[in-house]
Image (cartoon, helix red, strand yellow):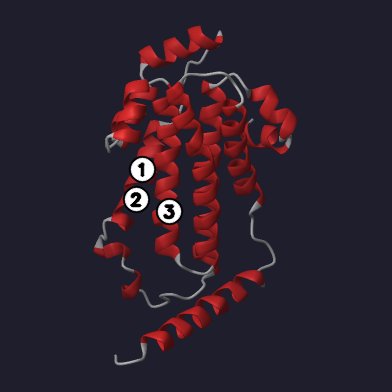
Amino acid sequence: MNKDPHQVMIELNEKFTENFGQWRLMTTHDLENTFTGLHGIALVGEILSGQNHSKHHEICCKIYDEIFSDGIASVYLASNAMDKPANIVLRRVLELGLAALYLWDMPHMAFSWDKHDQDLSFSEMLNHINSKGYISYINAENDSEIESEILPSTRAQKIYGELSDIVHGKISTFESSMDDRFKFVESDWSQFIKLIEEVSVMLLKAYLTRFNIKNEVFQRLPQAKMLVN
């Protein structure tokens, strides 16, 4: 291949514009639940930011807008048939979504992550927020009666693992090996939108379980009530 780089970029833009045009022609896009979930997540961050908390909570509150932005970007990439980039960004949504919850009650880890490049383990964070001790703490803190996991660990771990296979380049996920590579395929879109909807709703439910702000969220975003109940 010896094309001019500028011409390559022009042709790529034309290709993905064509893909988006095919997406627009679909009779239904099933966006409503995903966008409600993402708006609900951003709203959680806004509400928590308005409450008087400690310094490390300021770090945590910044995460929610990033989750929203990444979620929207992921949907847009998928609408252009950029499926692998969409899934890579979706993994970031899931990972940051869990971190926002985990770091809230871990001030030293919040500062280590923010100031000292501390890596966070998805499995460790997930085990922590679903531990009996943590759930007992939340029940005492919120006068609640949580009996189940805050974030369903088996399903969350499975999704994270599948998205990680894409991030780390397992051969089975290679776009270049597929017959319909870089083309808009309605079934691929359907599969993706169901997954990001599941992730966004899963995270929103976890936040409403952890934080005693459910009534305020439902008052400001009524459609979220039907989504999480």
Residue for point 58% across, 43% down: 38
- The circle on residue 162 is 2
Q: Is residue 43 visible?
A: yes
Task: Looking at the picture, tell me which residue is in the foreground, 92 or 182.
Answer: 92
Report helix, strand or loop for mark 3.
helix
Depth check, mark 3 against mark 2: the one in front is: 3
Vertical order, 78 against 45 (above or below): below
Depth check, mark 1 against mark 3: the one in front is: 3
Specify the quadrant of the image occupied by residue 227. top right
Specify the quadrant of the image occupied by residue 158. top left
Task: Looking at the picture, tell me which residue is in the foreground, 2 or 129.
Answer: 2
At label 3, the amino acid type is Val
> What is the spatial separation of the Cα atoms under label 2 and label 1, in whole angstroms?
6 Å
- Which mark is first along the chain, 2 or 3? 3
- Which mark is first along the chain, 3 or 1? 3
Q: Return the residue at label 3.
A: 89
- Is 31 left, or right, of 130 in this rendering? right
Q: Quadrant of the N terminus?
A: bottom left
**Label 1 crowd bin: few (<14), some (14–19), many (20+), radius 10 Å:** few
Expressed as whole percent of the image width and height from the top left, the position of residue 182 reads 43, 75
At label 1, the amino acid type is Lys
Expressed as whole percent of the image width and height from the top left, the position of residue 117 reads 27, 38
Mark 1 and mark 2 in contact (Cβ < 8 Å)? yes
Q: Return the residue at label 1.
A: 158
